[in-house]
Image (spheres, grey):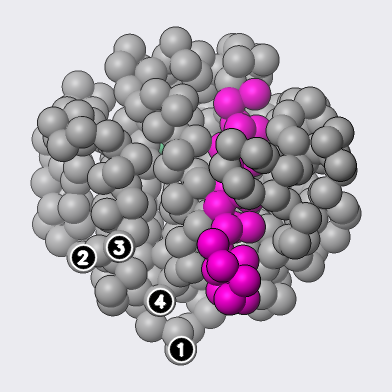
Amino acid sequence: MADIRLIDRLVQGETGDVVLIGYPEDEGVRRNGGRPGARQGPGRFRHWLHRYGTADNPEEEADLFDITLTDAGDIAGASLEEAHHNLGGKVACVLARGGVPFVVGGGNDQSYPNASALLGRGGEGPVGVVNVDAHLDVRPRVDGKAHSGSPFRLLLEDERFQGENFIEFAAQGSQVSREHAEFVRGKKGRILWLSELRREGSADGVFRNCLGDLAWRCPAIFVSFDLDALASFEAPGVSCPGVVGLSAQEATSIAYYAGAHPQVALFDLSEYNPVIEEERTGRLAVALFYSFCMGVAHRLRHRSGEGA
Ligand code: MN
């Protein structure tokens, strides 16, 4: 079994424990003034997926043999609005079938349609959201249209969502306006600056505590991960790179904790831009998927009572 890899466990379909969905759109990045190219993210992600990760990981004492991993393909749409509609529909469908969607972008604008699909399930209590991102992404719409800088404003203005269940994780004050920070706080959202995480020790440890805090009142949690939360030497291929940021090791650990938490119902990964840099960032994006899947394998084994 030594040579069985992550890719060997992935089959086409919409029903599975983890369901990969591609969102090949960067019109939202363009509308936000960023560098286009993220529409090629899902395609290059799948390329690097073929080269990464053993299905049986002896370091983690974890394997992928007991979970079902499926690839539901890419979202299409004649306009960004249509792509958002189709994305929300696909995520809702996967959730209804009991799977955990892992959506690979594409621009960060995907996060509102994704959150909206989870909120639309209804009847299951409040939804918690953690946005791992150097930015707050609470800019107003441009000409009435959503873009890659607006998803969490749309979320915080959605009456189905309660702002106290929102955490901005690893934001950087040098990349955020005071007005936007005040907007988040005015909606009762919490901002955990990168510098605060550094003072508290490991960022992944703080992330785990955040999930624990949200889990008390939110039966379902959405973790949204923008690759620009990492320092640019770790993830250069993003629309808007930052000088400082999370390390790749912290990021993979965060993805693992998200996968392992029984209440994390949805994960999205945004802003992989292979036009700017392909291999290092592509391998990192796949490493996050791999770590998330390992976490889900841990979660399901624990749930089925076979020990963890
Ligand atoms: Mn972002």
Residue drawn where x is 73% and y is 61% of the image: 67
The type of residue carrying mark 4 is Pro
Picture disc at residue 9 = none
The part of the image, by quadrant, that contains residue 213 is bottom left
User: Which marked residue is nearer to the observer: mark 4 or mark 3?
Assistant: 3
Q: Rate crowding at label 1 as few (under 14), some (14 to 19) or many (20 or more) other CA atoms within 10 Å.
A: few
Picture disc at residue 212 = 3
- Percent coordinates x, y for residue 57 in the rendering: 67, 40
- Percent coordinates x, y for residue 194 in the rendering: 23, 31
The type of residue carrying mark 3 is Gly
Q: Earlier in the sequence, mark 4 or mark 3?
A: 3
Q: Which quadrant does the C terminus fall into? A: bottom right
Q: Main secondary structure of the magenta part?
A: helix
CA gap between label 4 and label 3 equals 11 Å
75 or 72: nearer the viewer: 72
**Where is mark 1, residue-wise?**
123
**In this rendering, position of residue 282 left or right of residue 110:** right
CA gap between label 1 and label 3 equals 21 Å
Which residue is the extreme one toward the bottom?
123
What stretch of residues is rendered in magenta?
A: 282-308
Residue drawn where x is 67% and y is 68% of the image: 99
Q: Is mark 2 within 8 Å of ligand 1?
A: no
CA gap between label 4 and label 1 equals 11 Å
**In this rendering, position of residue 250 left or right of residue 57:** left
User: Which marked residue is nearer to the observer: mark 4 or mark 1?
Assistant: 4
Residue drawn where x is 30% and y is 43% of the image: 205
